[in-house]
Image (cartoon, grey):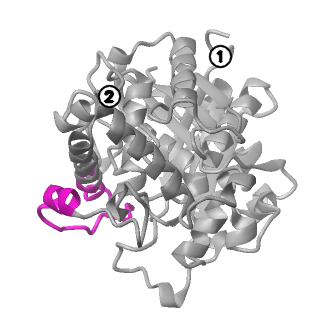
Amino acid sequence: MKSPRRKIYMLAGYNTISMGTGRSDFNPKKGSRPLESYIKEAGQAVLEKIGGADKVDEGVIGNFMAARFNNQANLPAFFPLIDSGLKFKPAISVEGACASGGLALMAAIKSVLAETADVVLAIGVEVQNTKKAVYGADILAAAGWNQSRKNGHAYFFPGVFSDRAGAYYQKYGKERTRMAMSQWYVNAIENARLCHTAQESENKKSNLYDMALSMPLNPKKFVDHLTVLDCSKVSDGASAIAVVSEEGLKKLGYKPEDAVEVVGFAQMTSDITMNPENPTSLETTKQAVAKALDMAGVSLNQIGTIELHDCFSIAGIMAIEAIGLAEPGKGVDFVIDGKSKRDGEMPINTTGGLIGWGHPTGATGVHQAVTIWEQLTGKAGPAQINIDESRPYALSINMGGDDKTLVSIVYKKAKS
């Protein structure tokens, strides 16, 4: 299928604060806000923008591990808590590790395409600060194959991407790769400072690059090839957005220019039991992006901004190569040369990405969509970048596990 047979739009997005270490209002001794409070905040914010619960046909919620972080399952039944008007309406939950939010968007898109709904309320949520970091890392390890967990690092996924980073160092050179990873951290914090909901919005430290570059690797206390600054945050938060048909857009009283149009998408998986054939390449990401761009009929030089899954800085660099912005081994130069900065050749993660904005795992894919909706409609506030008329498209990439579950979406700045 080259293009969707029905127009699909997203609008009225909302992000809660990404809560966790780095924010002055985070106090681990007081515990996390309840999971349902995040669902309610994000859901109600979207309903207020679209005119109420009676406009919604269906609901979908993306979440990874509420059953273990919060001892809570059956998340679809929280939709009536958002608003009593959602009672008796169909709702589902979806899970694909850190791509759960992207899967929520895909489920909503498919409902619109199937003509079972004209307006779908899509929510992503995760509350993870209920556990100490090392215990949380064990829970998050379920995004990988359980059998490999037996021999894995205590910090399982930092260990997985540490191995990828080590392979990349060996193949392409450690010094320049570390320079690029340090610059990635700087970009993330500088972008997060412009977004009040970002976890690192209050990070005012100077000399970020020198701090990141000089931080020593400490295998005895962490992992072999990454520092904590290379890692995304342990975060609590939720994001929500309305996914609607052309008829739904009219029903809500919105003009196309208030929305973004979904013009291409791809959803892919690879074998969770298999190690990557090439640890320096994100092959499933590469395939998903290529398929989404092909469906949209769009080339990279038409993309104005990208939200990609930088669970670790090395993943961000490897994603740049998987997208096709740089050849293998040259992603480091793309970053060092400033091409991924907000005023660079391809602005990436304009509110900080997973490292700067935060990574409430089940919410991340929806957060990416909300950020793109804000950017393409001029609603990003201090984080707004210039979207050139010749590049009216945007791309999101949401990855679950070690390049195992992928959702990539191409968006267009809509016009009447």
- Residue 192 on the magenta span: yes
- Residue 293 drawn at (x, y percent): 50, 17
Residue 341, quarter of the rendered image: top left
**Residue under the image location 41 percent in, 72 percent down:** 221
- Left or right: 175 with respect to 28? left
Residue 251: image x %, image y %? 65, 34
Q: Which label number is shown at residue 329?
A: 2
Frontmost residue, 404 versus 36: 404
Q: Where in the figure is residue 227, as x and y percent of width and height?
A: 34, 61
Q: Position of residue 89 (x, y in %)?
A: 84, 50
Which amino acid does the dot numbered 1 rest on?
Pro
Establish if 53 lies above or below 102: below
Label 1, secondary structure: give it.
Answer: loop
Instruction: Say what amino acid the circle numbered 2 marks.
Output: Gly
Question: Does the magenta-highlighted stretch encompass residue 339?
Answer: no
To which residue does mark 1 refer?
Answer: 4
Residue at x-position 36% and y-position 48%: 313
| Res. 369 visible in picture | yes
Q: Taking the image as drawn, is residue 357 in sight?
A: no
Front residue (pair 65, 19): 65
Q: Quadrant of the N terminus?
A: top right
Magenta segment range? 189-214
